[in-house]
Image: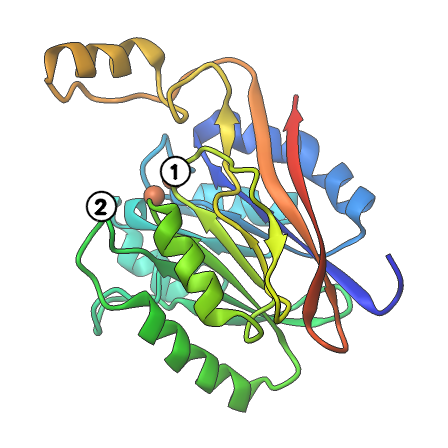
Amino acid sequence: MSRNTATVLMIGDVVGAPGLRALYALLPSLIRRHDADLVVANGENALAGFGIGADEIAAMHSYGVQVITTGNHVWERKDAPDLLEREQYVLRPANYPRGLPGRGMVQVQGRHHEWIVINLQGRRELYDIDCPFAAADALLQAAQKQHPHAIPVVDFHAELAQEKEALAWHLDGRVAVVAGTHTHVPTADERILPQGTGYLSDIGMTGPIDSVIGMKVDTCIRRFLTQIPFKMEIAEGDAVLMGAAFTIDVETRRCVAIQRIFETL
Ligand SMILES: [Fe+2]
Ligand SMILES: [Fe+2]
């Protein structure tokens, strides 16, 4: 890509030790190959599938992830409030009720360019939190004032493609990227909306491939057969890294190319 473009790698939910291993092994070469200016990865499942801890945060940063986004699972660890307060580059969805620890937006300097990363969560088949559409409007208004030259990108952690598509259209031309996370299943619907927002409903997960969304297959089948919520554990074996590279024209802040990533160890 030319000097007037910048690429952000958005990496799908990192699931447990296999996900971290995949990041360690595959991310450096992906960064080189895409000449990435910024790497954002969702870490809500990094600690054994449920939440993220200080060790996982340190590991992800050391592998090249600048900003860690999260989602509904981030609250499942006791030390989550402390971590979210302390770690400037670990976000939680911005539209949780007022007063909760942490933040859902951060300004970050990439290799050559300034970015704004926003983390939001959907409400359909999830929790009845604040409106992600209104939250995005308020955040973008603030960002525009404080960091007028930064390139805004969004991790929208949501279950339903309808809600993700609607948010992307709502933000078309105001953010460079809306990348969906949470389902752990990648979609193939990448497109650039008319005003320049690059969109993909779900960028998938980074974790064990022989699994049910990263978890042990046997337990998941038993849960469905019996309707008993047996404790789920991370699957073992080979891992896959999923995500997408979004290339942005830095003058217009429009997305000009989207490439899905699906790399196995
Ligand atoms: Fe997840
Ligand atoms: Fe999630």
Q: Residue furthest front?
A: 194
Q: Residues within 10 Å of mark 1 (few under 14, many from 20)?
A: many
Residue lying at 59% horizontally and 41% vertically, measured from the top left: 243
Q: Identify the disc placed on residue 161.
A: none
Q: Which residue is mark 1?
A: 183
Please say whether residue 174 is visible from this viewpoint: yes
> Could you say which quadrant of the image residue 53 lies in?
top left
Please say whether residue 92 is visible from this viewpoint: no
Q: Residues within 10 Å of mark 2 (few under 14, many from 20)?
A: few
Asked if the residue at tag 2 contacts the one at tag 1, i.e. Cβ–Cβ closer than 8 Å, the answer is: no
Q: Identify the disc placed on residue 125.
A: 2
Q: Residue furthest right?
A: 2
Q: Mark 2 or mark 1, which is nearer the start of the sequence?
A: 2
Q: Is residue 262 above or below residue 191?
A: above
Mark 1 and mark 2: Cα distance apart in space? 11 Å
- Horizontal side, residue 7 vs residue 188: left or right: right
Looking at the picture, which amino acid does disc 1 mark?
A: Thr
Mark 2 CB within 8 Å of ligand 2: no
Looking at the picture, which amino acid does disc 2 mark?
A: Glu
- Disc 2 on helix, strand or loop? loop
- Disc 1 on helix, strand or loop? loop
Mark 1 CB within 8 Å of ligand 1: yes
Residue lying at 20% horizontally and 10% vertically, measured from the top left: 222
**211 or 76, which is in the foreground?**
211
**85 or 8, which is in the foreground?**
8
Q: Is residue 120 above or below residue 44?
A: below
Q: Position of residue 187 (x, y in %)?
A: 51, 37
- Horizontal side, residue 181 vs residue 40: left or right: left
